[in-house]
Image (tube, grey):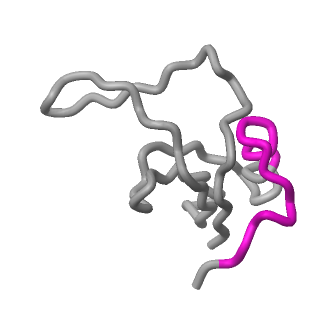
Amino acid sequence: MLRAALKQVTGDKDRVDVMIGRGGIARLPDPAALRIVKDGAGYALLRLDAFGASISHTWHPSIDDAKAHASSAYGIAPEEWVPEP
């Protein structure tokens, strides 16, 4: 697993992420950090809230693809990724 802290959301500002639950529909909060984890034949790029809970994710065929998405959407540089146990 890899993790990177977020300083800003730089990507698609026009896209609105929503979550649907018992309380209805709400806008997702901006993530505080990102995590890349193995997911089947590829990797999931998880968006984490301030408490470390996953609030949304995208699937990518490779770690490099997940990192590229994180770079374009969140401005994460390659050296900002740190391994997690």
Name the one closer to the observer, 68 or 53.
Answer: 53
The residue positioned 78% from the left and 51% from the top of the image is 76
> Does the magenta-highlighted stretch encompass residue 73?
yes
Q: Nearer the viewer, residue 80 or 65?
A: 80
**Residue 81 left/right relative to 59:** right
Most foreground residue, 62 or 51: 51
- Taking the magenta stretch, the answer to whether it contains residue 51 is no
Q: Position of residue 13 (x, y in %)?
A: 64, 20
Q: Is residue 64 above or below residue 69?
A: below
Dominant SS in magenta: helix
Residue at position x 44%, y 55% in the image: 50
Image quarter hosting the C terminus: bottom right
Q: Which residue is rendered at x = 38% and y = 26% of the image?
A: 27
The stretch of residues the image draws in magenta is 68-83
Identify the image quadrant of the N terminus.
bottom right
Q: Residue 22: image x %, image y %?
A: 13, 32
Measured as percent of width and height from the top left, residue 68 is found at 82, 46
Residue at the far top: name it. 14
Q: Is residue 39 above or below residue 59?
A: below
Residue at the outermost left position: 22
Identify the residue at the far front of this view: 7
Q: Quick check: 15 above or below 64?
A: above
Instruction: Give above or below for 22 relative to 24.
Output: below
Quarter-wise, where is residue 33 in the image? bottom right
Which residue: 61% across, 52% down?
A: 45
Judged left or right of residue 69, residue 51 is left
Estimate the x, y position of residue 83 in percent, counting from the top left.
69, 78
